[in-house]
Each structure stands twice: as C-alpha cells, then as structure tokens.
Image (cartoon, coloured by chain):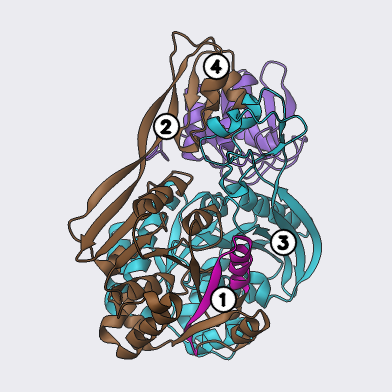
Chain colours: A cyan, B purple, C brown
Amino acid sequence: MINEIAVISGKGGTGKTTLALSIIPYFEDIVIADCDVDAPDMKILLSERVLREDTFIGFKRPEIDYTLCTHCGLCYEKCNFNAISENIEIKKGSCEGCGVCSYVCPAGAITNKDYPIGKIYKKQTAFGPMIDARLTPGEESSGKLVSEVRKRSKEVALEENAKTIIIDGSPGVACNVISTISGVSKALIVTEPTLSGIHDLKRVLELSRMFSVDAKVVINKYDLNLAMVKEIETYCDMTNTDIVLKMPFDKKIVESISNLIIPSTSNISFFTSKEWLSFIEYLQKEK
Amino acid sequence: MDTKHTRIAICADSENPKDDVASRFARCEFYGVYNHKSLSFNFEENKAKNEMSGAGAKAAKQIYDLGVTAVLVPEIGPKAFEALEAFEIEVYRYSQTYSVRDAIYDYYEKKLQRVLASTKTGKHA
Amino acid sequence: MKIAILSGKGGTGKTTLSVNLFSCLKQGTLIDTDTEEPNSHIFIKPTNEVITNIYKNHPVVNKDLCSFCGKCGEYCNFNAIIPTKTKVLVFEDFCHDCGLCEMVCPNNAITYKTKVIGEVFSSHLENKSFHYGKLKIGEVSGVRVINKLNEISKEDGLVLVDCPPGVSCSTVEALRGSDYAIVCAEPTPFGVSDMTMVVELLREENIEFGVVVNKSGIGNNQIYEYLEEENIELLENIPWTKERAALYSTGNLIADKDPIFNEKMEHILQKVLGDNYDQ
C-alpha cells in the first residue's frame, strides 16, 4: 500500500510547505502532490518541467443570449445572491452557480455552461513526478480540485511503482483540508507556539477527528515561546494527540529557502539531529 | 455464508474484480456491485465523482438506486454516512489495499468492521 | 474610506498589521473577515461583545404533500436535497439557499427553515468599533458572514478590513467596496509567488494597492525586484526581530511596546490616508 503523508496546518505560515519539502529527500520512489491549490508553492523549490496541463471545471455558470432576452427582469428578481444586475448583466464574482436564473427565464435566454476555475498540472521534478493545481483567483475554493490532485497523484504513483506520496496540504478547516487528509496513512499538523497557532490547531484537530484521521503535531519555531509550547503540550496530552517533532526557528532555514535549496539538504545542524532523524524514521515506517 | 444482502457495493477504480479496491468512497471511478444470487459482479460508473460538493450524498443515492443494501468503503465522511444510513444501507470498512474480489471474501468471512455512527459530531444537521 | 489588508500567503503578518494599524487610529472600525480562523480578537481583546447571528435557510419537505417525483434532487446543483422513493434527505451544510427546489416542486411541498451558520461579534470602545465573524465548522461558505460585516460597517467613516488569506471568493467578498488595499508580503520565494496571485486579483477588481514587506531581513531581495518591475508602491519595510515575534506570540500589540514599529504603522497610515489621517 502506498504511504501517503499529508502535511497540513490550521493557520497559514507555520512552515507546512518548508516541512513537506524537507521530508522529500529521505524517500525514494516518490510522487509529490501539492494540494494547496490557492498557493501552490512546492514548485518554487523543485525545478520542474510541465508535462501536462488540464483545465479544471467548476460549478456551471449562466450565459445570457441577449438576442432572446426580453429584459423582463425575472432573473434579477429571483437571484438570491445579487449576481444579476438590474441591467441583466451577470456579476461573475457573486454567482454561485445555482441555476435559478436559467430555470425562471421565460424566454430561454439563459443556459448553464461549464466554467473553468483553475488548472491542474503533471510535472517532473528532480525528486520525482509532481501533481499540482492552481485555482483562478476569486473562485470558490473547492475540495473537488484537491481531490483531483490526490487522485492523479495516486494514478501516477501506481504507474511508476512509487512507494510514497508526499502531500502539501491547504491551510484552513474547509473542504480542501478534508480532501487533503482523506485516507492518508500519516497526517502532520504543523503549528507554531503563538495564541493564533494554538487557536487554529484546535480547530484543525477537530476536523481530523471528524474524518478519523490520526493526525500528529509538529511544533515549528518552538524556541520563540517556550511557555506556549507547554500550552500546546498540555492540550495535546489532554486530547491524546502525539507531538512528533519540535523544530527550532533558524534563520538559516529561511535563507536556504530564499536560495531555493531544500533546507534539509543544506548544511543546517538541526537536520543531523537525533530528533529529526527519528522523525524521518517514523515517517518511513509502514503504517 | 451471510445471505442478508443480495447486492453489495464496493468502491473500485476499474471494472475488473481482480484489480485493487479504491481508496475513496465518493470519488472512486466505479462501484462494483456484487450479486450474491448470481455470484457475479456488475460495475457502474460513479456519477458523483465530479461533483463540486456533496459527492458523498450523491454517491449514496446512486448506490441506493442500484438496489444495494450494504457497501464496502475505505473511509466515510459524516455526511456520506448520514446519507447511507438514511437509505438503510449498511456500511463496512476495509483497511488494506487488495483486490475487489478479496474484499468481498473478507466481508463474507466477517473480517470487515461495520461502521456505526462513529464519525458524526452533530455539528451539522 | 475602506482599506483592505490582505496577503496571498497565510502567516505573512496580515492580522498583525491590521490590529496594529487599528491601534494607531483615533477613530475607525476594524472588521476581521477571516471567518474560518478569526484571530484579531486575540490582540484587540474586546469586552462587552454583542453577538449577531447569521442565518441561512434550508428546505424542509412536507411528507404529506411530497409525491417523491425527484425533481428537487434533479435540479439542485449542490446535492443538498436528495430524494428517494420513500423520503427526502436534506444536507443543510451544502445548501446555498438559492430557492430552486421550492420553485421546481410541483406539489408545493417545500418550505424553508432557518438556522444559524455563523456569528458576528461586535464591540465598541470610545471612537472605535471592532467586528469579527466566525463560521460554524462544517459550513461551506463564509460569504454570508462577510456580507454582514460589510453591511454593519457600511456607514462608518474609516474601515480597516482584515481579509481572509488566499484569493478565493471569500476574499473577493471582503474586498467589496474597498478604496485601497495594503498587501502584506514576506520577502521569501513563497511570499513573492503568492503575491503575484493577489496582484492579479486586485488588478482585476480595479483596486489601488501598495505593499508592506513584513519580516524583512529574513529572506532575499527578489520581492523588491518584483515590486520595481511591476511598478508597485512599497509602503513600508518591517524587519523581523525576535522581540516582535515574541510579542505577537503572546497576543500583544507590537505598536504598544515597540516605538519603531509604532512609527512604521503611522507612516503607513499617513501614506494611505493622506489628509484623512488624524494623528
């Protein structure tokens, strides 16, 4: 069975992508899945070659044939989202794709069309194949696009006989995250020792439990506030959650990223530590 | 051998019972419907897999319409489970990757866990 | 005047910037529209909050009138209503409250029931108002809550909007009616990459904007090159220091304890508000 490792965080900016990237060099025969479709960043450090690009379709959107439209205004009246103006123009940003306007139009002037909301890519990187995607700015975040990234990464893994899929997830607590962690062998929640970090950790843990995913916690930049680390430890203890790694804040890690080098391949002492290596060992283990 | 269910559905990504089971319920490619009376498989394309939201609920309806009364799944979200429960479809979970046929054998050998209301939190509906 | 504060990437300091800018104002309103993970209240520490419920409707089927024709399920684009031969299932969380099922039902069997999907917390202190929204877990969209926040603050003179991270439709809703946007960016390759998406959105929405580079000194100069290439105004540079990070981590307003930081906040306000800034 393929070892799928997902890295998520409730709050953004905790170091999720940095961690996901740092794990990669320790695995052979991998596929990388970047499920952060709002901000796919894995590609920045993985020199990539695009092999395939597909358009991704979202909810259907209405299109008005103005040669048939009688300007009766019924669609404007019935739209619950203020997505049609009084001049019978569709306000793309407000439309939720419900289909009411096309249903009520007495002149049959409105049809529902497939609407592209993003792109999904298959790429080749120095470490193996990668699937990532980009949601067009302004579109509704969707678990479906993330599901598609997961699905394709699995297909590629089977084709190439890969043993591990490393997944960079979406921040937040919505459908994207659910699709990121569904059915994975290991899920890591990256948090930071700040009030905001703890607040969001609790919410994402709740979500993982809802989906029967046994998520483990990674505390990043732990040395910035040891008192907060204690709070996280207490909370995890109370909820039977394991903390599998504590990473210190190291300017060299940020510098490494800025130089487009995966931190764990740079000359940074933390990555030779026992703590880091046992963490990797844990990840490499079969479930 | 358990004869309670005439039709059992299982999540699959191909139409061959020798191929591996799927790893997602509502997003798999096919549902393999095993008919206990005729001892044969029939594969139906999953109509819910491309839904933007509510795929689980739509998949449950499709399975219900196929006359299935038990389904074998790798995982199940709370809403999908709610839908299956409302359709009175029993849910069993497999936890390894093996062939569709082997999963069905496991079901009959009572090796699969029945899923009861374990993932619901009552926060919605 | 409405000023939005946003970032493509999470964790760049958007909320830090919003709450600290707000603390330097003599009057004004701050709305936190990150309904999935609102955080500004941790720093503002509001008291005497008034809670406004945000509602959404979902269909209820009258079993006596329902003929199980299945039309509602056929038309619903969100799989929120699933009819079967003997009953009709409703998934409230998926329902977008569009009204279509009621329209298509041939037997008038559908009516609507209301439920709370989120809350807005409001507080006032002297000449300032603070509102933040929270979406209940499981709900698919915070747009309704953001709508309410926009409505509540519509008549206020100066409004700062702490936007959700990313560039999804929630962010678009939060940006509605903004006169100017402050983009909070970090000087790392991730920061630059994510900024380009925000810039794309702001240009599409036709909103004037400037950039604050936060946690500067920890990355590289790529972002400054990008700003120059794209002719984007750099409002201010805020260097990362361990002290600032520590203050943030314990929910403190950096501007209260760090005079240089405070000065930078005032500098930003001056640039953005011009004559409207009352020091």
Provide the residue designation for mark 4. C105
Q: Tell me where residue C273 appears, x and y as whole percent.
A: 42, 75
Q: Mark 2: give few (<14), some (14-19) or many (20+) Cα within 10 Å.
A: some
Report how far apart the C-alphas of labels 4 and 1 lie in the structure.
50 Å
Q: Tell me where residue A216 appears, x and y as whole percent.
A: 44, 62
- Residue B59 seen in render: no
Provide the residue designation for mark 1. C191
For the residue pair C124 and C13, the one nearer the viewer reads as C124
Q: Mark 4: give few (<14), some (14-19) or many (20+) Cα within 10 Å.
A: many
Provide the residue designation for mark 3. A162
- Tell me: B2 left or right of C60: right
Magenta extent: C193-217
> In the rendered structure, does residue C204 fall within the stretch colored magenta?
yes
Q: Secondary structure at mark 1?
A: helix
Quadrant of the rendered image containing residue A228: bottom left
Q: Tell me where residue A128 appears, x and y as whole percent.
A: 74, 69
Looking at the rendered image, the disc whose residue lies closer to the viewer, 1 or 2, is 2
Q: Secondary structure at mark 3?
A: loop
Work out whether disc 4 and disc 1 sit on a shared chain. Answer: yes
Report how far apart the C-alphas of labels 2 and 4 lie in the structure.
17 Å
Q: Amino acid at mark 4?
A: Cys
For the residue pair C22 and A12, the one nearer the viewer reads as C22
Q: Secondary structure at mark 2?
A: strand
Residue at the (59%, 60%) spot, across then down: C205
- In the rendered structure, the residue with mark 1 lies on which chain? C
Q: Amino acid at mark 3?
A: Ala
